[in-house]
């Protein structure tokens, strides 16, 4: 499938600005969503029990198998195409509608069987609600894909935040009223109804049933289906194995721990993939510039994610005591490896855009299938013969291994030397090492006698966070200066901070 050429109407500088602005909007949106999610989680863990979270995670994992297997990814084609017309959008909408209705019907028809297979009759009603939510997804406006193609991520940001606020309000309201696990899926159902209506307001497109371009999409879908199989196994099978061998309480602890630990990845790394892919599509015919963007992307990813993920792992005991409470005892030991597992996978998944934009799907699928097979064997053994901590440790180890393999393979595909990527990320890794030593040293000198209360834990958390932030920033700056102050992630971050400072100062003066 041919890649789209560089848009002649946009200069390289304009593309970079649009990509940066789009990434900023998506990151801001995810940060806002994460803030809402954190507040929601802190409230829900006090209203519900780990078994409730485990039930929803188990039902979600079972449905995700079918959902992931049939995911289309048609937005990739629309974004890459040099020109599009109404017929193409109508084809995308029609095929997504057919998929949603078919998948929702299959999930609903097999709800009872899934509940029996997973060993809990309560799952049947949960799966019915999820099936209806899936079927509704086909009514979403296809104009949202047009917004992505046009790099209008500010409108996507508004859509994302509004839907999340509705989900938060409904879920918390139902939890306070009923204290029943169904609130976790009913909130999503109401939010889906709102998101559909709002999508047609933000990105109106009156669709017509059409299958005019179905051949093009099915040609793409053969690789997408293979990727979906790998993604399904990677994302859902560990959850199903853990629930089957260790029970819903262990699964609930893992699910809550991962949500906390993976916050930097889900709220920063995931949302920038869309703008970065759109940016790659604009410069794909300029290999040197594409290589530079790829190396810069690795550097920026490391500068942002490494300190945050390592920092969460270091303060996991305080997070457990403050955020989760006594009902979630033992979560700290799971949060730490989950943070590093999410970090490793973030680097691995970051490279998928490189394979996609260069149309190297056979190689992408082959590597993904091999790494997922290795992980599944390890997770199965850990869940069967070990326990929750063993599973989390295996996921962490395979995540870090995957990051190294994916980076090396992506460099080969893009004609980029591994040393070019290493030159962008080593300072962040080194600074994280200094941060780890400083935080552990401070913790070792804190009073460890007796039971730590909530207030004492909060004070300790603030001290450890302050120590980690100060140490990492100083270490990264020193390493950057010792390296000759190269034009990398630090330069961009410092430049952005300098531009922001006058605005903050003006706002303060005006106030």
Image: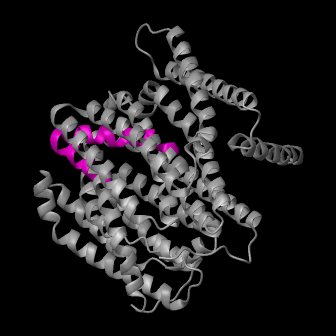
Q: Position of residue 477 (x, y in %)?
A: 72, 30
Q: Is residue 141 left or right of residue 102?
A: right
Q: Can you tell which quarter of the image residue 210 is in? A: bottom left
| Main secondary structure found in the magenta portion | helix
Q: Position of residue 334 (x, y in %)?
A: 35, 32
Q: Position of residue 296 (x, y in %)?
A: 64, 49
Give the colour scheme of this rendering.
one colour
Specify whether residue 144 is in view: no
Judge by depth and name the residue closer to the eye, 265 or 293. 293
Numbered label tally: 0
Q: Can you tell which quarter of the image residue 233 is in? A: bottom left
Up/down of 179 relative to 386, above or below: below
Q: Can you tell which quarter of the image residue 28 is in? A: bottom right
Q: Which residue is depicted at the point 35% across and 39% down?
A: 398
Q: Which residue is depicted at the point 65% across and 66% down?
A: 283
Q: Which residue is depicted at the point 76% across and 33% down?
A: 484
Judge by depth and name the residue closer to the eye, 324 or 67. 67
Specify whether residue 159 is in view: yes
Judge by depth and name the residue closer to the eye, 458 or 239. 239
Residue 253 in magenta stretch: yes
Residue 101 in magenta stretch: no
Q: Position of residue 136 (x, y in %)?
A: 36, 75
Q: Which residue is depicted at the point 55% across and 37% down?
A: 306
* Magenta-tinted stretch: 235-264
């Amino acid at each position: 499938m041919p890649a789209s050429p560089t848009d002649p109407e946009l200069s390289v500088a304009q593309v970079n600005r649009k990509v940066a602005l789009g990434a900023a909007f998506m990151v801001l949106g995810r940060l806002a969503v994460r803030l809402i999610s954190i507040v929601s989680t802190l409230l829900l863990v006090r209203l519900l029990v780990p078994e409730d979270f485990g039930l929803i995670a188990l039902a979600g994992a079972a449905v995700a198998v079918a959902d992931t297997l049939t995911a289309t990814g048609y937005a990739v084609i629309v974004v890459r195409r040099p020109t599009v017309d109404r017929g193409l959008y109508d084809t995308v909408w029609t095929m997504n509608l057919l998929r949603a209705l078919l998948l929702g019907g299959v999930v609903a028809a097999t709800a009872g069987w899934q509940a029996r297979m997973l060993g809990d009759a309560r799952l049947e009603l949960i799966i019915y609600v999820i099936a209806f939510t899936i079927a509704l997804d086909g009514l979403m406006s296809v104009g949202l894909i047009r917004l992505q193609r046009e790099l209008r991520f500010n409108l996507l940001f508004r859509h994302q935040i509004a839907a999340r606020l509705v989900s938060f309000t409904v879920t918390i309201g139902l939890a306070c009223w009923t204290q029943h696990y169904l609130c976790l899926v009913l909130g999503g159902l109401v939010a889906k109804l709102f998101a559909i209506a709002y999508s047609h307001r933000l990105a109106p497109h009156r669709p017509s049933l059409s299958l005019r371009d179905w051949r093009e999409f099915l040609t793409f879908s053969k690789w997408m289906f293979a990727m979906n199989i790998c993604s399904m196994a990677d994302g859902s099978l560990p959850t199903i194995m853990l629930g089957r061998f260790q029970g819903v309480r262990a699964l609930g602890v893992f699910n809550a721990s991962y949500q906390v630990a993976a916050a930097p990845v889900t709220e920063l790394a995931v949302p920038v993939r869309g703008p970065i892919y759109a940016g790659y599509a604009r410069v794909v015919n300029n290999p040197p510039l594409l290589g530079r963007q790829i190396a810069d992307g690795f550097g920026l990813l490391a500068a942002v994610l490494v300190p945050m993920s390592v920092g969460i792992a270091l303060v996991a005991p305080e997070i457990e005591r403050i955020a989760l409470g006594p009902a979630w005892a033992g979560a700290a030991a799971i949060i730490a490896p989950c943070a590093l597992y999410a970090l490793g996978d973030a680097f691995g998944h970051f490279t998928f855009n490189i394979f996609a934009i260069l149309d190297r799907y056979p190689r992408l699928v082959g590597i993904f299938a091999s790494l997922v097979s290795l992980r599944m064997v390890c997770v199965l053994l850990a869940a069967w013969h070990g326990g929750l901590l063993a599973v989390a440790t295996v996921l962490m180890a395979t995540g870090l291994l995957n990051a190294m393999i994916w980076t090396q393979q992506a460099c080969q595909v893009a004609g980029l030397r591994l040393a070019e990527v290493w030159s962008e990320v080593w300072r962040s890794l080194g600074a994280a090492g200094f941060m780890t030593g400083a935080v552990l040293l401070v913790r070792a000198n804190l009073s460890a006698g007796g039971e730590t209360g909530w207030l004492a834990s909060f004070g300790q958390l603030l001290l450890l966070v302050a120590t980690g932030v100060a140490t990492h920033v100083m270490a990264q700056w020193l390493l950057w200066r010792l390296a000759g102050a190269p034009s990398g992630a630090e330069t961009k971050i410092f430049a952005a901070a300098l531009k922001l400072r006058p605005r903050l100062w003006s706002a303060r003066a005006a106030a």
